[in-house]
Image (spheres, rainbow, N blue to C red):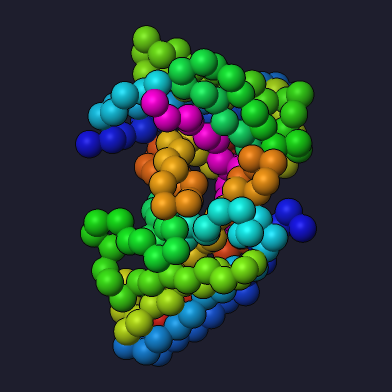
Amino acid sequence: SSELAQDPAVSVALGQTVKITCQGDSLRYSYATWYQQKPGQAPVFVIYGQNNRPSGIPDRFSGFTSGTTASLTITGAQAEDEADYYCQSRDSSGNHLFGAGTKLTVL
Amino acid sequence: QVQLVQSGAEVKKPGASVKVSCKTSGYTFTRYDIHWVRQATGQGPEWMGWVNSDSGDTGSAQKFQGRVIMTRNAALNTAYMELTSLTSEDTAVYFCAREVYNSGTYRFDPWGQGTQVTVSS
């Protein structure tokens, strides 16, 4: 399959933990990168590789990949984490793929 | 700091072409490929293709082959994306992004601010 599948929407209570998943064959060839996108803004990556965070991203964000499934976990979700989250990887042909996105609501 | 600054919003009629520019700064332009991604309202990002900033080689998603032209001017540290034969389905925000590879991952960092392209008769 040349797609990355994500759940359309997930909600989490303030301060609780939430996991967002991404499934696709391309994850056999490269790890996923996770992006956070808020309305009217460009995506910003929050996790890359097995579990790497760029500077400025809080350590409550973590990632994990096993086989064809990648996950993004937010431990102790904050109101500012409410956003759309997209996974992205590259397949064996060199094409980049994006998931359709997961809308995270913090209650 | 690394920055990608795109050209302004465009309104085009069906059948026309649009060309978006992406001016980079803060790094050695020729060391990184520039990719183009578009996003329609309420949809996820859609990868369109790339240009090698050094050689000018390009590649694109099958969906856009024959309709997208990606170029660069290394002297100006600028990449360009031209999309031809526009239809209303091409209405979207178009982003350029620098591709970075490490830790077994390809990622886009940073992104331009986006260019709204509206196709309407």
Q: In the rendering, at what x and y percent does residue B76 appear?
A: 36, 13
Name of the residue lying farthest toward the top: B75
Residue drawn at (41%, 81%) of the image: A106
**Taking A45 as reference, is A65 left or right?**
right
> Up-down: is B69 above or below A6?
above
- Quarter of the image for residue A82 reads bottom left
Which stretch appears magenta?
Answer: B31-47
Q: Is residue B108 magenta?
A: no
Classify the position of the C terminus of chain B by image quarter.
Answer: top right
Q: In the rendering, at what x and y percent does residue B99 appear?
A: 46, 38
Residue drawn at (70%, 23%) of the image: B84
- The answer, for residue A50, to whether it is visible in the render is yes
> Up-down: is B60 above or below B43?
above
Q: Is residue B36 magenta?
A: yes
- Quarter of the image for residue B117 reads top right
Q: In the rendering, at what x and y percent does residue A76 appear?
A: 32, 84
Q: Nearer the viewer, residue A85 or B53?
A: B53
- The answer, for residue B23, to whether it is visible in the render is no
Residue drawn at (47%, 51%) of the image: B104
**Taking A106 as reference, is B39 left or right?**
right
> Up-down: is A83 above or below A89?
below
Residue drawn at (61%, 24%) of the image: B58
Q: In the rendering, at what x and y percent does residue A73 appear?
A: 43, 77
Classify the position of the N terminus of chain B by image quarter.
Answer: top left
Q: Nearer the viewer, residue B82 or B66?
A: B66
Q: Nearer the viewer, residue B61 or B39?
A: B61
